[in-house]
Image (spheres, rainbow, N blue to C red):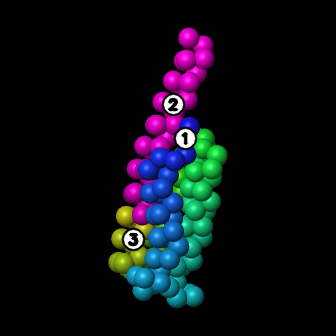
Amino acid sequence: MNGRYWQDWVILGAAAWLVVSPAFLGFASFGNPAAWVAVILGVFLVATATEALVLPDTIEDWADIAIGFGIMGSPWIFEFTKDAAASLNFLAVGFVVTICAMAALGRDMREEASRHHAAHG
């Protein structure tokens, strides 16, 4: 599983954006749960995306899928749906992360099956 695929880089970019997005989209206040959630989930996502680039395996794909769904659900879970900029940002980033992670998981599973099949002929 070569971690140098476009999906891993897109997820890393989305993670970095999520961390800095409160400042750019105007919801970076200390008392705003959207800002805290963006930073916390963004940092977790940076960690899993970096791990995918360094030591690729399917586990980080599954983690990225879970984090992606968590990002998409955050506006309702943390009750900031009235903040349109934050909510749309979370939905877009979560969607991109989830789709890319699913594509990466499929790719990694196909590669793993191919290697297994080749080894056991």
* Residue linked to disc 1: 2
In this view, the mark in front (1 or 2): 1
Is the stretch drawn in magenta largely helix, strand or loop? helix
* Residue linked to disc 2: 111
Residue 21 highlighted magenta (yes or no): no
Residue 15 picture location, percent across and down: 51, 64
Q: Secondary structure at mark 3?
A: helix
Residue 111 highlighted magenta (yes or no): yes
Q: Along the line of sight, which residue is nearer the eye, 37 or 4?
A: 4
The magenta segment is: 93-121
Question: Who's the residue at 56% across and 55% down the image?
Answer: 49
- In this rendering, the answer to whether 116 lies above or below 60 is above
* Residue linked to disc 3: 89
Question: Who's the residue at 55% across and 17% down the image?
Answer: 118
In this view, the mark in front (3 or 2): 2
Q: Residues within 10 Å of mark 1 (few under 14, many from 20)?
A: some
In this view, the mark in front (3 or 1): 1
Q: Is residue 37 left or right of residue 14?
A: right
Residue 82 picture location, percent across and down: 38, 79
Q: Along the line of sight, which residue is nearer the eye, 16 or 87?
A: 16
Question: Who's the residue at 52% across and 36% down the image?
Answer: 108
Amino acid marked by disc 2 = Glu
Which quadrant of the view contains residue 103? top left
**Mark positioned earlier in the residue sequence (1 or 2):** 1
Tag 1 and tag 2, C-beta contact below 8 Å: yes
Q: Secondary structure at mark 1?
A: loop
State the separation of the CA atoms marked 3 and 1: 29 Å
**Mark positioned earlier in the residue sequence (3 or 2):** 3
Q: Secondary structure at mark 2?
A: helix
- In this rendering, the answer to whether 58 lies above or below 26 is above
Q: Residues within 10 Å of mark 3 (few under 14, many from 20)?
A: many
Quadrant, the N terminus:
top right
